[in-house]
Amino acid sequence: MSCRKIRKLIDEAERPDLLMPEAASHLESCPACNEFARQRARLRQLLISPGQVSAPPDFHIRLKRRLASLNQSPPTPMPLWKLAAAAAIIIAIATLLLLRGPKPTPTPPASAISSMAQPEIQPLQKLLAKPSAGPTRNKAAKHRARPAAVRPQELDAMPRAALILVRRQDVEYELAIPAISVGAQPIFYDLNSKGSARVIKTSF
Amino acid sequence: LEQYARPGVFKRAIIEGMTIVTSKARAVELGGPSAESASDHELVAAIREGDEAAFDEIVRRYQNQITNFMYRMIDDYDRSVELAQETFIRIYTSAHRYKADYSFSTYIYRIAANLAISEIRRRRRRKLLPLNFSDEDGEQVHIDLPDGKPLPDELLIEEERRRAVARAIKSLPEKYRAAVVLRDIEGLSYEQIARALNLSEGTVKSRINRARNLLREKLSAYI
């Protein structure tokens, strides 16, 4: 065994007075390790030499007194930092909710839809041409979206992963989602106008 | 009452409309087995039931150990006693949180170590001025306040050595200090220290090794 290993054994022994036979025989033949073991033993002795300090005789009485006063004292007000942290969390949650906007209204059941007056189905292209009629577009998000890896004319040939029916008060249209995405941004395209592809939403 | 006061059994018994809380600790009064024979786990279970005699027994068992540990960590007896009491108050008020996954001694040392480390940090923030001055050569000289009582030479030497050991421990970074005090002074196993300080055994061993090397340098005159 190397000296390094022996010293590790000496240092990490659960019972410093008991060494493995290999370590003990090494110490007999290695003065440096022997000196290391001696210094460690002396250090341990030195650390415990001041002796054990005892609790004062009235420790128990004082403890009981403290416990009694603890039970009698009114509940302590919440510390300032805790109040500040709670306020920060509430503000963060409120901001998050505001940024996410209102929840979409739930889709009525199929039976209700069939009984409703069917609105005119318009191509998406047409809707998007009129910014006021279409959904509000996030300009910043539009600039981030770069579906450059797929040419619009190739989209039709790609397998469709999902079909979404978008229904508004006055209009509805179908969106097909091909089984591709750019980053986390799905590409939507309009089934009715062949060959065109527009990013109208940048994330789910 | 005998059946409720048998070893290891803590029960709330309702006998003819009377609620009698029995425990090993309470059994002392009832002539049953004494609290001294109860294990730490049993005593904490009794504390959870509101048994004050069980709490008294826990305090009796650990008050010296915890006071000593605190004293070796912060080198201030009065504050050590206060912190040792704080440790027991935490045991009492959060007995319901104690899980018997590992030994109670590890649990109590964990609370004590956390309190001691907080105290060390608090003192550092307060920047308490140690009684250290520089001599003409720029060397740091530690000044201990004399107690005015003449001491024989042997006692003086012993006191100086005690002060040197305390100073050396105090100079250790807190993360090394707790590990080496728990190992070399309190005699905990590496596993217990790892649990008490919430560290891996490997980290504990390495910290103790570094602490010993630092202490050897600082106490070279005595080794």
Image (cartoon, rainbow, N blue to C red):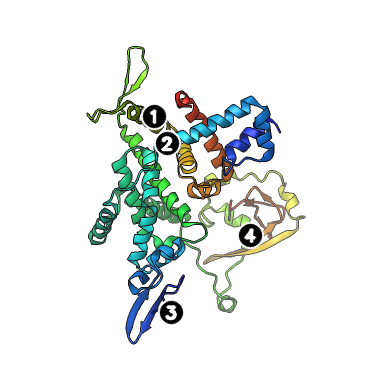
Label 2 is found on which chain of the structure? A
Spot occupied by residue A62 in the image (x, y as percentages of width and height): 26, 53
Above or below — where is A82 with respect to B173?
Answer: below
What is the distance, in whole Å, between disc 1 and disc 3 at their CAs? 55 Å
The residue that appears at 41% across and 46% down in the rendered structure is B114
User: Secondary structure under badge 1?
Assistant: helix
Spot occupied by residue B152 in the image (x, y as percentages of width and height): 30, 27
What is the distance, in whole Å, between disc 1 and disc 2 at their CAs? 9 Å
Label 4 is found on which chain of the structure? A
Above or below — where is A164 with respect to A37?
Answer: below
Q: Mark 4 belongs to which amino acid?
A: Pro
Spot occupied by residue A148 in the image (x, y as percentages of width and height): 68, 43
Mark 4 and mark 2 residues within 8 Å of each other at the beta carbon: no
The residue tagged 3 is: B3
The residue tagged 1 is: B161
Front residue of this view, candidates A5 and A32: A32
Q: What count of labels does the image hold? A: 4
**Looking at the image, is mark 1 or mark 3 earlier in the sequence?**
3
Q: Mark 3 belongs to which amino acid?
A: Gln
The residue tagged 2 is: A49
Mark 1 and mark 2 residues within 8 Å of each other at the beta carbon: yes
**Looking at the image, is mark 4 or mark 2 earlier in the sequence?**
2
Which residue sits furthest bottom?
B16
Q: Mark 2 belongs to which amino acid?
A: Ser
The residue that appears at 36% across and 20% down in the rendered structure is B140
The residue tagged 4 is: A123
Front residue of this view, candidates B22 and B149: B149
Mark 3 and mark 2 residues within 8 Å of each other at the beta carbon: no
